[in-house]
Amino acid sequence: MPDPIAVLNERFAIAGQLQFCTGENGLPKARIDNAWATAEVYLHGAHITAFQPKSHGPVLWMSPLAQFQPGKAIRGGVPVIWPWFGPHATDRSKPQHGFARSAEWQVAATEALADGRSRLQLVLTDSDATRALWPHAFELSLTVTVGAELVMELTCRNTGDQPFTAGGALHSYFAVGDVTQMAVEGLAGREYIDQLDGNRIKQQAGPVEISQEEDRIYINSADTCVIHDTVLARDIQISKTGSQTTVVWNPWQAKARAMADFADDGYQHMLCIEAANAAEDVVRLAPGESHTLSQMLAVSKTG
Ligand code: TA6
């Protein structure tokens, strides 16, 4: 049996910028190190676990207790949420946030761009296992472009003969110096569903600041957000396409403690801002149609 990592490198490695290697718990991952940044992407869940532009610190937060187990989601980085956001609409025994983030994806392509950026495309197609959870034929791809900015494009295509409706998200965990000393600009005036207060609709006044558990789905929000991090003296700009819902989540102390793969104090150094197709912002695709949800991350020093 040929070594799967050697086969991946023979077919897809890019000398001097993109290699495949064995990651945590023996799971294969791509390591990217080019003129602009470093990044890591596991084939498990098409999960980006690291992005760090040169001359900046890590942009994504990873739990030190993250599990790298088949069938389980990795805590931190950018989980790919699809084909539903949150609990399944009618069957709570189905996996929270869908199955894409705990499935084994395949490498479809790699590319060295003329400007020195690196591109990696991973794909997931329907199988007996996915159809048992969600009875549709699909092709899902994640295209990751690593440069000074990180660009993630999640494209789903209906390859069946019946329409389907899908939700999803790029559930990005951002590293912050201290979540109580940062503010998120870009959502002022937007209405949000407060998932911690009976899904009541509320309105955002000014920047988003965190001093307790928060779990909000901002609606009619195609906005670009900026995390102003005073401790790390940097801004993280988060823009997106194909999404009208922005999810903001911090588990705070009790929920962090209740999650086995979340360090008890981890909530102090992370914030999720997610480009989502959630609530009413789900996507209906006729046979042959496709939809792309994308999120772009850019970091700048402020100190
Ligand atoms: O991002 C919001 C959210 O839906 C929260 O309700 C919380 O459940 C979080 O996702 C993490 O979910 P997970 O299934 O990854 O533990």
Image (cartoon, rainbow, N blue to C red):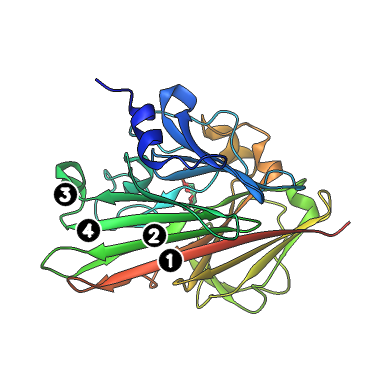
Q: Which residue is mark 4?
A: 138
Q: CA distance from mark 3 to mark 2?
A: 17 Å
Which of discs 1 and 2 lies nearer the camera? The answer is: 1
Tell me which residue sits at (26%, 64%) in the image.
Answer: 157
Residue under label 3: 131
Q: Is mark 4 within 8 Å of ligand 1?
A: no
Cα–Cα span, label 1 and label 2: 8 Å
Question: Which of the image's four quarters has the N terminus?
Answer: top left
Label 3 lies in ligand 1 vicinity (Cβ under 8 Å): no
The image quarter in which residue 194 lies: bottom right
How far from the left and from the top, in percent, is residue 43? Answer: 39, 39
Amino acid type at circle 2 is: Gly
Q: What amino acid is labelled 3 in the image?
A: Arg
As drawn, the label of residue 293 is 1
Q: Classify mark 3: helix, strand or loop.
A: helix
Q: Is residue 262 left or right of residue 89?
A: right
Q: Which mark is residue 168?
A: 2
Write down the quadrant of residue 127 in the picture.
top left
Residue at far right of view: 303
- Residue type at mark 1? Leu
| CB contact under 8 Å: marks 1 and 2 | yes
